[in-house]
Image (cartoon, grey):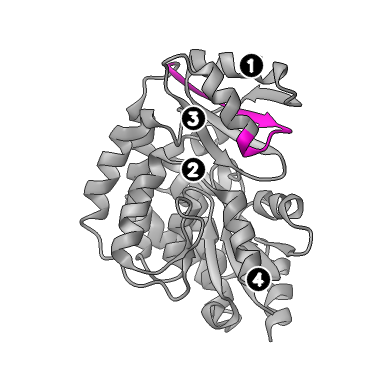
């Protein structure tokens, strides 16, 4: 069976993430220590114990979600002897999850990935003063309809589609006033519901250009290897393996649309029949159910789930 590994994005964090893995497996403990050392921060304590308000800060949530995902990978490989690359065809990650996927597939070191995501979170937060930007989910809208809403509501302000998540869920991002106008415009166009999201900055829109510049500089200084499996880019919605292309696309990703629905449909076209979400939460498995019911979605984050998954691969 052809399978792809999926890595969650922001919003999937939860206090307690990774705690059971660390209690059960030395490989997970070593991974969390590696991330703590790279950041000179007890991120693992924040993951296991909270407080939630600190964990949800973008600069903490991004490396924490990566750590939880890569810990799952390490345990499967070292404790269960699973060669994930040999048992899979592609990897994909939602926004910051693309970094987790690249790390899991050996394109980036754990330490570099942790530091890149810390910087990504900090620079995204700093790019726009609090209160000036916003994001909203348009529920019951496909991308074309969301683009119509954006075109009508922008009125010269920054406003764009940030995430095409699939299953009738598109997230828009931009100037707060423009996002609020878009929610009103959406009501007139048959969108089921428009709701402001509890985020601290307007991700994946042109207001994030300062963060994209910071990431371009940082990515230019790290070693990027060819990943063991092609990693689907959020920007191109297809598998990428060339390190120079991956660097460039990670920079574009900061201000660009996360083409998640198209990415999942591309995997289906390549013959992928199963997607395994590795890490915290079940968001991506849930989206897959709505995007294409023919692809089997799994969520693998707890020790029992890892054990069952490893057995299914043997």
SS for dot 4: loop
Residue receiving disc 3: 160
Q: In the depicted view, which residue is nearer to us: 262 or 195? A: 262
Picture layout, residue 242 above or below residue 260: below
Residue identifier under label 1: 185
Locate residue 20: give its quadrant.
bottom right
Residue 133 position within the rendered picture, expressed as x and y whole percent measured from the top left? 45, 21
Say which quadrant the C terminus sits in. bottom right
- Give percent across and percent down for residue 162: 51, 36
Q: Find out whether residue 208 is within the magenta segment.
A: no
Between tags 4 and 1, which lies in front? 1
Q: Residue at x 65, y 77 (%)?
A: 2
Q: Residue at x 39, y 38 (%)?
A: 255
Decide: is 226 above or below 154. below
What distance separates the C-alpha of mark 3 from that of mark 1? 14 Å
Q: Is residue 177 left or right of residue 182?
A: left
Mark 2, Cα crowd under 10 Å, few <14 / some 14-19 / many 20+, is many
The Cα–Cα distance between marks 4 and 2, rounded to whole angstroms, is 29 Å
- The secondary structure type at the circle numbered 3 is strand
Q: Which mark is residue 145?
A: none
Disc on the earlier residue, 4 or 1: 1
For mark 4, what is the residue?
A: 272
Mark 3 / mark 1, whichever is N-terminal? 3
Residue bearing mark 2: 61
Looking at the rendering, the stretch of residues picked out in magenta corresponds to 132-144
The answer to whether 28 appears left or right of 271 in the picture is left
Identify which residue, 294 or 46, lies in the foreground: 294
Front disc: 2 or 3: 3
Is there any visible trace of residue 293 in the rendered image?
yes
Question: Is residue 17 something that shows in the picture?
Answer: no
- Above/below status of 10 relative to 276: above
Q: Please tell me whether mark 4 or mark 2 is closer to you in this view.
A: 4
């Amino acid at each position: 069976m052809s399978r792809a590994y999926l890595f969650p994005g922001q919003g999937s964090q939860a206090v307690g993430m990774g705690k059971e893995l660390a209690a059960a497996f030395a490989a997970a403990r070593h991974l969390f220590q590696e991330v703590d050392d790279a950041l000179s921060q007890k991120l693992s304590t924040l993951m296991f114990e909270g407080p939630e308000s600190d964990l949800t800060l973008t600069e903490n949530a991004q490396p924490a979600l990566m750590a939880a995902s890569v810990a799952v990978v390490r345990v499967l490989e070292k404790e269960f002897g699973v060669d994930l690359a040999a048992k899979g065809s592609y990897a994909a990650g939602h926004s910051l999850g693309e970094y987790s996927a690249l790390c899991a597939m050996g394109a980036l070191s754990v330490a570099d990935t942790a530091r890149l995501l810390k910087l990504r979170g900090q620079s995204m937060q700093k790019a726009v003063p609090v209160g000036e930007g916003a994001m909203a989910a348009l529920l019951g809208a496909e991308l074309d309809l969301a683009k119509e809403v954006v075109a009508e509501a922008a009125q010269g302000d920054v406003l764009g589609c940030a995430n095409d998540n699939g299953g009738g869920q598109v997230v828009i991002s931009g100037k707060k006033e423009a996002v609020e106008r878009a929610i009103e415009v959406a009501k007139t166009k048959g969108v089921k519901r428009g709701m402001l999201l509890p985020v601290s900055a307007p991700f994946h829109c042109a207001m994030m250009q300062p963060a994209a510049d910071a990431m371009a500089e940082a990515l230019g200084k790290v070693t990027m290897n060819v990943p063991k499996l092609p990693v689907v880019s959020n920007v191109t919605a297809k598998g990428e393996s060339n390190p120079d292309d991956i660097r460039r696309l990670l920079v574009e990703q900061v201000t660009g649309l996360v083409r998640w629905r198209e990415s999942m449909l591309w995997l289906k076209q390549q013959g992928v029949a199963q997607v395994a979400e590795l890490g915290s939460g079940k968001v991506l498995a849930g989206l897959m159910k709505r995007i294409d019911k023919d692809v089997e979605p799994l969520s693998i984050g707890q020790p029992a789930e890892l054990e069952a998954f490893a057995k299914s691969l043997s």
